[in-house]
Amino acid sequence: MNTQIIYDRITSIIIEMLENHKQNNFSESWISLSSDSIFAQNAISKHTYSGINQLLLNYLGRKYNHTFNSWMTFKQLSKLEGRIKKGSKAAMVVYKSVLYLDKKTSKNITKLVEHLLKSGQSIEHLDYKKLGYLKQYNVFNISQIEKLPDEYYKLNDLENLTEFEKDERAEHVINSTGANIVHSPQNDAFYRHSEDKIYLPERKQFISKEAYYSVLAHECSHWTGHKSRLDRPIENVFGSEKYSFEEILAEISSAFIMAYLGYENRITDNVDYIDNWLSVMKNDKQFIIQASSQAQKSADYILAFSKAEKVAV
């Protein structure tokens, strides 16, 4: 499967998710935490899927009401003598790979280069060009597999969360960043780049702890874009592609942080934002991949201050 087809498939799933979110009066979750693991992971290796794979697998898990958030390849489940339930559809996991081509002949010399690098030899004598592209493989959710050993069907209870004012873990994560956060009676939340400050309504104005921390994580994600931090172009005109990119980046970054904290994050109810994202994604199939990658960097940057584990490995 070539890279463009992979981009198209991923984008179509995210578009479906956003359109469903609108049709369901904004009740759908971006990432659901109702299963056994906070983050989608491989049941055998315990590898936590990163970036766009978190969004894809968690959305599909919620769409098909999977009880678990662990996944296996066909080879892995076959080795355990598992059996895929009739009618189950595989989910796609993507990863970046590299192609090496001879500059003069355009011949694929990837195997040669990989052999040399693996054996510790130099490739400086080769006249090559390096091309990045996406590859994919299929996985199945544990809920789609029968006959596995009992250990794979065990569920872990998520620790109950306290009122958001007393959530010490969340407070520690946010306060450790050193971000300048100003609370005042108002009806808007935003990051002001010129002052490098985050402005929020008073805590008591928020309807829930999830709402408060989700908005705060979103604005902190914008804060990471300052030139003294991750240096992203964050002063953009509303409705532009760059503005859309930064907004959906912050929304995905917030989802990662909320998942880490143990909350079920909900995406924005702002129909203008969602319509704008949909418009851009339908014209740019790489948009969501790039936004997810930058969102993970933003979330990792925020969590690193509290010496927390990275969002995904």
Image (spheres, helix red, strand yellow):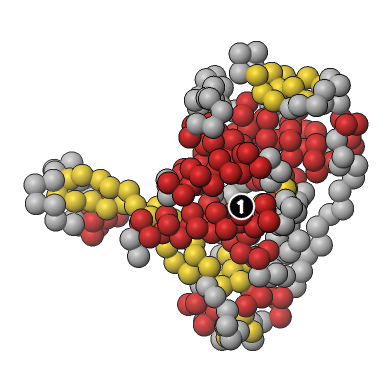
User: Residue 170, how many percent across, how many down?
Assistant: 78, 38
User: In the visual, does 197 lie left or right of 184?
Assistant: left
Q: Is residue 38 visible?
A: no
Residue 113: image location, x then y, percent = 22, 53
Q: Residue furthest top?
A: 195
Q: Residue at x 67, y 23 (%)?
A: 191
Q: Residue at x 62, y 78 (%)?
A: 144
Relative height, residue 267 to residue 11 (above, below) = above
Residue 128, visible in the rendered structure: yes
| Residue type, mark 1 in image | Leu
Image quadrant assignment for residue 252:
top right
Seen from the viewer's position, the closer of residues 223 and 13 is 13
49 and 249: which is toward the camera: 249
Q: Residue furthest left?
A: 104
Question: Quick one: label 1, few (<14), some, or many (20+) residues within 10 Å?
Answer: many
Tally of numbered tags = 1
Which type of secondary structure does the marked residue at label 1 adopt? helix
Q: Is residue 5 above or below residue 236?
A: below
Quadrant of the image for the N terminus? bottom left
Q: Using residue 151 as the reference point, say whether residue 123 is left or right of it.
A: left
206 vs 294, nearest the viewer: 206
Judging by the rendered image, the residue that carries numbered circle 1 is 18
The residue depicted at 58 percent of the width and 44 percent of the height is: 275
Q: 46 above or below 222?
A: below
Residue 271 lies, in percent from the top left, at 66, 42
For image coordinates 60% across by 84% down, the residue present is 85
Please give left or right for residue 220 compared with residue 81 in the image.
Answer: right
Q: Horizontal and vertical percent for residue 73? A: 51, 72
